[in-house]
Image: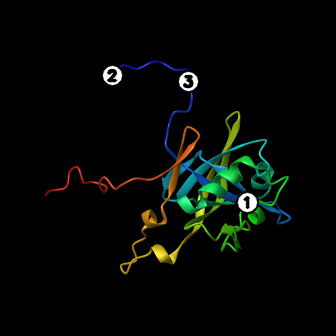
Amino acid sequence: MSKITWKPGNMLYPLPVVMVSCADKNGKDNILTIAWTGTTCSNPPMLSISVRKERYSYHMIEETGEFVVNLTTEALAYATDFCGVKSGKDIDKWKEMHLTRQKADVVKAPLIKESPVNIECKVREKRDLGSHVMYQAEVVAVHVEQDYMDENEKFHLEEAKPIVYSHGTYFSLGKELGTFGYSVRKK
């Protein structure tokens, strides 16, 4: 197998693809789809999202410093794509995609009820990186769908059929290959 060299670019794939709900200081809300997101710290729990400055939701996050990361699933794949290519400046994505606003516990932005996991976030730091602004945010509340909890209070996100994004394509996740530490576990 041989390799060729490409120009520098973002080749870290696949990525989680999430719908981020946000609201401005007057309560006008929107949903945007983001694949540039990730965990950045466990104590305190923090994550990051990167948003293009020309996105309609950018000013909302700038005004309030709050947002909700809503995990996506196979059932939400169409809405996930739609919320990434259509602008909330022109349409109500909630109405068009039949998504339900749910009140958050801490932030003013709504949760997406149909998402199995909603992560309420408050921006702690922002960094202008060029085409995108990266927001480092503290996780201030997490909501999980009870249907995916077992009798031992273990959460089974895999049952919700989460999706990922790679090079312009959405994929469902495949079979389990092992759990953390399986390579060194005694048999």
Looking at this view, name the residue that lies furthest to the left: 187
Q: For the residue marked with disc 1, what is the amino acid?
A: Cys
Q: Is residue 93 visible?
A: yes
Depth check, mark 3 against mark 2: the one in front is 2
Query: How is the protein colored in the picture?
Result: rainbow
What residue is at 59 percent from the left and 44 percent from the top?
Answer: 36
Q: Secondary structure at mark 1?
A: strand
Q: Are marks 3 and 2 in contact (CB under 8 Å)?
A: no
When the figure is inspected, residue 49 is found, relative to residue 145, above or below; the finding is: above
Q: Is residue 25 above or below residue 50?
A: below
Disc on the earlier residue, 3 or 1: 3
Whole-angstrom CA distance, mark 2 to mark 1, is 46 Å
In the image, farthest residue toward the bottom = 151
Give the mark nearer the N terminus: 2 vs 1.
Answer: 2
- Which amino acid, by three-letter code, is at mark 3? Pro
Residue corresponding to mark 1: 22
Q: CA distance from mark 3 to mark 1?
A: 32 Å
Nearest to viewer (mark 2 / mark 1): 2
Quadrant of the rendered image containing residue 94: bottom right
> Residue type at mark 2?
Met
Q: CA distance from mark 3 to mark 2?
A: 21 Å
- The residue beneath circle 2 is 1
Element assignment for label 2? loop
The image's mark for residue 8 is 3
Q: Secondary structure at mark 3?
A: loop
Whichever of labels 3 and 2 marks the residue nearer the N terminus, that label is 2
